[in-house]
């Protein structure tokens, strides 16, 4: 049976790039299903949880569509990849929009980048290509990707997991922040693998062939 | 390691084909946008910008098809500018696979478009393109004004103040073109680039005037640009994007090597 990869659509923007990149690396060996239906996610082998936009809008969309529970269930049971806001909303709480409660699937705060660091002013959003330092070295999703490879980022907030062993990758931008987390069958990253050229495509390829074992 | 400076090749697209010309004179067909974009991607381009110079409104949709086709196989950020008037135009480009759109003339005549668009699709998708020309005389405090219609029509708007206003309205990035330098191959207007980059908290892409690799490096080191955009030096194969990156790296600028 062909492998099924569900990309969760909860109405937060354009997921075409994520789907196209997955189709490109799957090379017809897996079905990529962009879906807002809980039963499709439940029947999928792998789950991708993207997201963009503001934290409050994301949370509202997740609750309105009932996808909050679907995400929580998938996160326990299948190889799971969170991307960008799909990483942030897994945490407990965000500073964004005057304070927003998140899914609380992992304990941690989401904070805004400081406007300045030492004397140097930081441009926010953090936009462009920055490196991911592999903290959980040898993780299957990093296979074939050089340590300190550049990935494409666009974000103004970053996650701070309460448990430091959750961190799989780190990136420096004024502060050193957690740019990827991994635990068991879950991997989530702040950057956009679908826009990160060869390194990003390799990570997606690794995800498709991942059995969910760390 | 830190955030890399970006090199962005720009493609002029007319009626669905890449065209090259010197200052839009002697425009020649230069091929299929998908093939050219793939080549730049393979050379290590950090983003690709498409400038739609299609004259007839009948052919406006061709750029949508170009973006869709490029986004099938090129997995780096894509920006599209030219002819954007309404939020609906922006939505269609984003749905086709663009990551950002560059709003130019419409931002000048209808600044509410920038506010409305950034509220609807997010600031990260909205690039405001600023075409500026120096209006101060030699020896005076430098001053630049926004011009439209390819640098022919003054607007009375001060470029630095305008850039700040665009940030307030939700611009996520500024694509800054010196109309004095565009097409001259004399390098960026570094003073202008620096003035805008210092004035705004969002990334600035320098454009207009690149004739060699030193100009690209100067845009970053002296102009304080976050990204540099060039068309002709890459189009006419004077340099590859890879050579440009190698040069910048040798000059101490952090770049992403493919």
Image (tube, coloured by chain):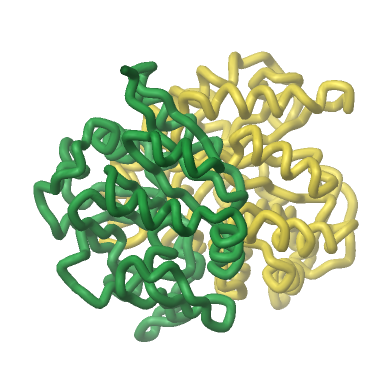
Chain colours: A green, B yellow
Vertical comparison of A112 with A21: above or below: below
Answer whether residue B155 is visible to the viewer in this image: yes
Where's the N terminus of chain A, which quadrant? top left
Nearer to the camera, B241 or A46: A46
What residue lies at 9% left-to-right and 47% top-to-bottom? A138
In screen coordinates, is A124 left or right of B183? left
Residue furthest out toward the left: A138
Above or below, comparing residue B131 to residue A140 in the picture: below
| Residue A119 lies in quadrant | bottom left
Against A145, residue A104 (above or below) is below
Query: Can you give x and y, in whole percent of width and height, for residue B79 in the image?
Result: 60, 41
Residue A96 position within the rendered picture, expressed as x and y whole percent measured from the top left: 53, 76
Left or right placement of residue B114 versus residue B203 in this view: right
Q: Is residue B138 visible?
A: no
Residue at 43%, 75% in the rendered image: A113
Query: Which residue sits at x=88%, y=27%?
Result: B57
A145 displayed left or right of B152:
left
Q: Quadrant of residue A44?
A: top left
**Tag count in the figure?**
0
């Amino acid at each position: 049976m062909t492998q099924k990869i569900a990309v969760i659509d909860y109405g937060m923007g354009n997921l075409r790039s994520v789907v196209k990149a997955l189709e490109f690396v799957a090379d017809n060996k897996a079905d990529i299903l962009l879906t807002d239906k809980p039963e499709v996610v439940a029947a999928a082998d792998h789950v991708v949880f993207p997201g963009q936009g503001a934290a409050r809008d994301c949370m509202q969309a997740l609750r309105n569509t009932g996808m909050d529970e679907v995400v929580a269930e998938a996160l326990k049971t299948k190889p799971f990849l969170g991307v960008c806001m799909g990483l942030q909303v897994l945490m407990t709480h965000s500073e964004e929009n005057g304070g927003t409660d998140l899914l609380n699937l992992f304990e941690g705060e989401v904070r805004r980048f400081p406007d300045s660091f030492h004397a140097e002013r930081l441009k926010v959003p953090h936009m462009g290509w920055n490196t991911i330092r592999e903290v959980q070295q040898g993780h299957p999703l990093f296979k074939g990707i050089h340590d300190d490879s550049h990935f494409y980022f666009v974000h103004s907030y970053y996650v701070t997991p309460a448990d430091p062993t959750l961190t799989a990758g780190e990136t420096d931008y004024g502060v050193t922040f957690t740019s990827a987390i991994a635990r068991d069958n879950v991997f989530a990253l702040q950057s956009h693998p679908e826009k990160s050229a060869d390194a990003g495509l390799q990570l997606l390829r690794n995800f498709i062939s991942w059995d969910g074992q760390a | 390691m830190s955030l890399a400076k970006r090199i962005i090749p720009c493609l002029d697209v007319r009626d669905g084909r890449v065209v090259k010309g010197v200052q839009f004179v002697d425009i020649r067909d230069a091929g299929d946008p998908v093939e050219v974009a793939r080549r730049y991607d393979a050379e290590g381009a950090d983003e690709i910008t498409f400038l739609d110079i299609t004259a007839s409104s009948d052919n406006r949709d061709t750029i949508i098809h170009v973006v869709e086709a490029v986004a099938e196989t090129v997995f780096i950020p894509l920006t599209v500018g030219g002819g954007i008037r309404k939020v609906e135009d922006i939505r269609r480009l984003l749905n086709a696979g663009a990551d950002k759109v560059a709003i130019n003339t419409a931002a000048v005549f209808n600044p509410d478009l920038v506010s409305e668009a950034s509220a609807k699709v997010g600031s990260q998708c909205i690039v405001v393109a600023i075409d500026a020309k120096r209006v101060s005389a030699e020896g005076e405090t430098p001053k630049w004004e926004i011009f439209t219609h390819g640098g022919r029509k003054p607007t009375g708007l001060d470029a630095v103040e305008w850039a700040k206003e665009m940030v307030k309205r939700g611009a996520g990035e500024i694509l800054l073109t010196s109309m004095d330098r565009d097409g001259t191959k004399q390098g960026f207007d570094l003073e202008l680039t620096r003035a805008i980059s210092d004035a705004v908290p969002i990334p600035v892409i320098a454009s207009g005037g690149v004739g060699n690799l030193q100009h690209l490096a100067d845009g970053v080191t002296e102009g304080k640009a976050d990204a540099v955009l060039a068309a002709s030096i890459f189009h006419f194969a004077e340099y590859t994007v890879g050579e440009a990156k190698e040069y910048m790296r040798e000059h101490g600028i952090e770049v992403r090597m493919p």
